[in-house]
């Protein structure tokens, strides 16, 4: 009987015998395990054992057995189930490759098959890949299938945020650098400072006469750029939403003359409420930022790919409504009148 390896669960199997693993060989490193039961051997490997958030990790099952054995691997990353089983412990299964059955070199009576799964986590910390099971049945066996089961793997997922970063703050503000001014400036220094001051004043009037790009025009240009990169599949969902967060925060920063890029979400919402933003714009901004916060800091799963174009449209409408609501909502256009 040819080797049969399925990617589904043990459908139709009425009994499973008690597990009696003949030997579990010690692994050479902490990201590899070898499990042997009789004439069936399974090597499970996790590579790398440590990675940053959202970095793919490869889980590999290398199973070798007699060619007349029927193998039933655990269902991992099945998308068409009800509900779909697209998670493995603390990880999301983003891709899988079942490979093909191949003969073992130098032994025509044995065959092997390699399964590879791509795992990703948006949550940092010491995460666990649960035990992986492969059941097998051979014609001479009088009882139900036997199982080979690995031990759990611990994977260290490192955060992209520094250990000293406040999760409520989107970027660190550098401390001020003290500058000690001389108590008695020399005449040459005084002349130099006077020249710099005159140049700064002249530059101010020159720049004041030049037309400036409004916050609305800048933000719309950036949204168009993200939309184009998304359509060309140059951005993942987390990367696109992260860029959209930066765009909308900088729009608020320029439009409201406030430090929106360094505010926590609740502080930013309070600020736009105090500046009499339209209620629908406040609701859109709040819903978007809280969604991104949940994904970034709580590891909430991302929605489908339609969430990115949806939020691009929502933010474009928000920017238009805020910019056209009232003069108080567009202080960036008042600067030239001062």
Image (cartoon, grey):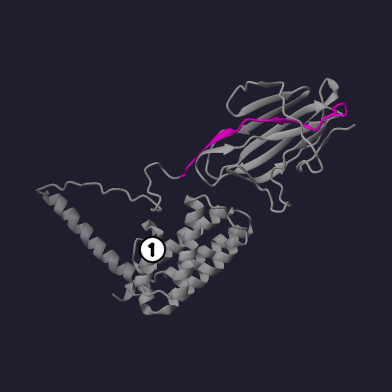
| Residue at (47, 43) in percent of width and height | 159
Image position, residue 319 (x, y; %): 47, 71
| Residue at (47, 76) in percent of width and height | 321
Q: Quadrant of residue 5?
A: top right
Q: Secondary structure at mark 1?
A: helix
Q: Nearer the viewer, residue 281 or 301?
A: 301
Is 149 one of the magenta-colored residues?
A: yes
| Residue at (34, 71) in percent of width and height | 274
Which residue in the structure is indicated by mark 1?
268
Is 30 one of the magenta-colored residues?
A: no
Q: Nearer the viewer, residue 13 or 68?
A: 13
Q: Quadrant of residue 36?
A: top right
Question: Which residue of the protein is positioned furthest toward the left in this rendering?
Answer: 184
Q: Quadrant of residue 68?
A: top right
Image position, residue 257 (x, y; %): 34, 66
Magenta span of residues = 138-160
Image position, residue 34 (x, y; %): 67, 25
Residue 311 relative to residue 167: left or right: right
């Amino acid at each position: 009987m040819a080797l049969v390896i399925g990617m589904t669960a043990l459908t139709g199997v009425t009994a499973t015998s008690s597990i009696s693993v003949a030997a579990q060989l010690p692994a050479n490193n902490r990201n590899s395990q070898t499990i042997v039961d009789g004439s069936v051997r399974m090597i499970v490997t996790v590579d790398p054992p440590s990675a940053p958030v959202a970095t793919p990790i490869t889980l590999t099952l290398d199973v070798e057995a007699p060619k007349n054995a029927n193998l039933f691997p655990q269902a991992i990353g099945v998308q068409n189930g009800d509900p779909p089983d697209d998670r493995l412990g603390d990880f999301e299964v983003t891709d899988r490759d079942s490979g093909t059955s191949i003969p073992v070199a130098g032994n025509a009576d044995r065959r092997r098959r390699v399964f590879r799964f791509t795992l990703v986590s948006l949550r940092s910390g010491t995460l666990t890949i649960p035990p992986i099971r492969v059941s097998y049945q051979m014609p001479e066996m009088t009882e139900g299938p036997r199982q080979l089961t690995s031990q759990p793997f611990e994977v260290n997922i490192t955060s992209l945020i520094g250990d000293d970063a406040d999760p409520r703050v989107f970027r660190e503000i550098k401390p001020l650098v003290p500058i000690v001014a001389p108590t008695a400036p020399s005449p040459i220094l005084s002349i130099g400072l006077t020249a710099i001051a005159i140049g700064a004043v002249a530059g101010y009037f020159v720049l004041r006469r030049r037309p400036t790009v409004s916050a609305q025009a800048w933000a719309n240009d950036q949204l168009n750029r993200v939309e184009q990169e998304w359509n060309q599949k140059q951005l993942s969902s987390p990367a696109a939403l992260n860029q959209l967060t930066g765009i909308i925060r900088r729009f608020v920063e320029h439009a409201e003359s406030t430090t929106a890029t360094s505010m926590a979400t609740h502080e930013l919402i309070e600020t736009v409420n105090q500046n009499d933003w339209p209620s629908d714009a406040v609701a859109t901004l709040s819903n978007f930022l809280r969604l991104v916060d949940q994904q970034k800091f709580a590891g909430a799963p991302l929605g489908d790919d339609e969430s990115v174009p949806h939020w691009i449209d929502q933010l474009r409408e928000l920017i238009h409504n805020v910019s056209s609501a009232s003069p108080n909502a567009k202080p960036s256009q008042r600067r030239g009148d001062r």
